[in-house]
Every structure is written in C-alpha cells, then in structure tokens.
Amino acid sequence: MVKTLGAKRAVLLPVSAPFHSSLMRPAADRLAARLAELSLQPPRLPVINNVDVAVEDDPARIREALVRQAHSPVRWVETIRRLAAMGITSVAECGPGKVLAGLTKRCADGVASVALADLASLEAALGSLE
C-alpha cells in the first residue's frame, strides 16, 4: 500500500502505543483537559506544530495544536523544510534515540541535526558550537 502512495519503503516501529494516530484520541482528550488547566504565555520564539506546519504564537492555537498532534500524523519532512525556509540550519532531537536526527539530515539540504540523549551528548554538541 505505501508504495502506491510513493513511499520507497515502510518500517515497523517498535513503539509502545499507536502514537500520532486516531487510536490516540482518548489520550488526546485527556491531554486537552490537562492543558485547559494551564495558563500558557505567548512563546518567545516561533513554534511550528507538525500537524499543519503552521507557525503559531497564540497560546490558544498552540494548545489546540498540541492536542491534535497526539492523534494526527506527523508531518516531519514538511516541518523540517519549513524550518529550512525560515533560515534554521541546526536541529536538536532531545531524548532517547536518534531516529528523527537521522531523518532530518535527509529532509532538507543545509540543515544539520544532532541527537541529545544525555548530558554527555549535550556537552559534546555545545562544545562543537564554540
């Protein structure tokens, strides 16, 4: 099926839940309830959501996008290309693993990426910026 949609290959991901799919709607509803309890301030830097690749600065729209991201497909390639169009040249993946850092390198020319999984990798990345 994925080949008919233009994909070169498909890979089963070893994940613990059906993240970013409609099966996450109940969790997204709980997330919405929790986010409604928070007072969000306008961001100091642009926020790009990966649901519709929009640049958001309104806390209400950011809150809504966070909920949609829980149950919607990730538009990673488009997000990275949007960052590149905005002049971003470096992206950091924070957390365990490095899947997104690897994918980022293939999404847009001129955008470097690094995986920050622990303090040592953060220190190494910061050292390379000096």
Image (cartoon, rainbow, N blue to C red):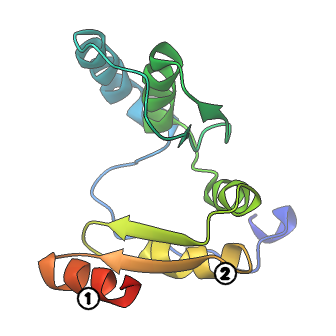
In this view, the residue in front, 100 or 81, is 81
Q: Could you say which quadrant of the image residue 104 lies in?
A: bottom right
Position above or below: 3 against 72: below
User: Does 129 sit above or below residue 27?
Assistant: below
Q: Is the residue 78 above or below the residue 59 in the image?
A: below
Mark 2 lies on residue: 106
Q: Nearer the viewer, mark 2 or mark 1?
A: 1
Q: Residue 120's image quarter?
A: bottom left
How many numbered discs, if any? 2
In the image, what residue occupies the spot 69% across and 62% down? 87
How crowded pointer 1 is (Cα within 10 Å; few <14, some 14-19, many 20+) is rated as few
Answer with left or right where residue 113 lies relative to residue 84.
left
Give coordinates of residue 114: x percent, y percent: 42, 80
Q: Which mark is residue 96?
A: none
Q: Residue furthest left?
A: 119
Q: Nearer the viewer, residue 46 or 13?
A: 46
Residue at image x 61%, y 58%? 76
Q: Quadrant of the N terminus?
A: bottom right
Earlier in the chain: of badge 2 and badge 1, it is: 2
- On the rendered structure, is 102 left or right of 124? right
In three-dimensional space, the C-alpha distance between marks 2 and 1, rounded to whole angstroms, equals 22 Å
| Relative image position of residue 100 (x, y in whole percent) | 48, 71
Q: Amino acid at mark 1?
A: Ala
* Mark identifier at residue 124: 1
Amino acid, disc 2: Arg
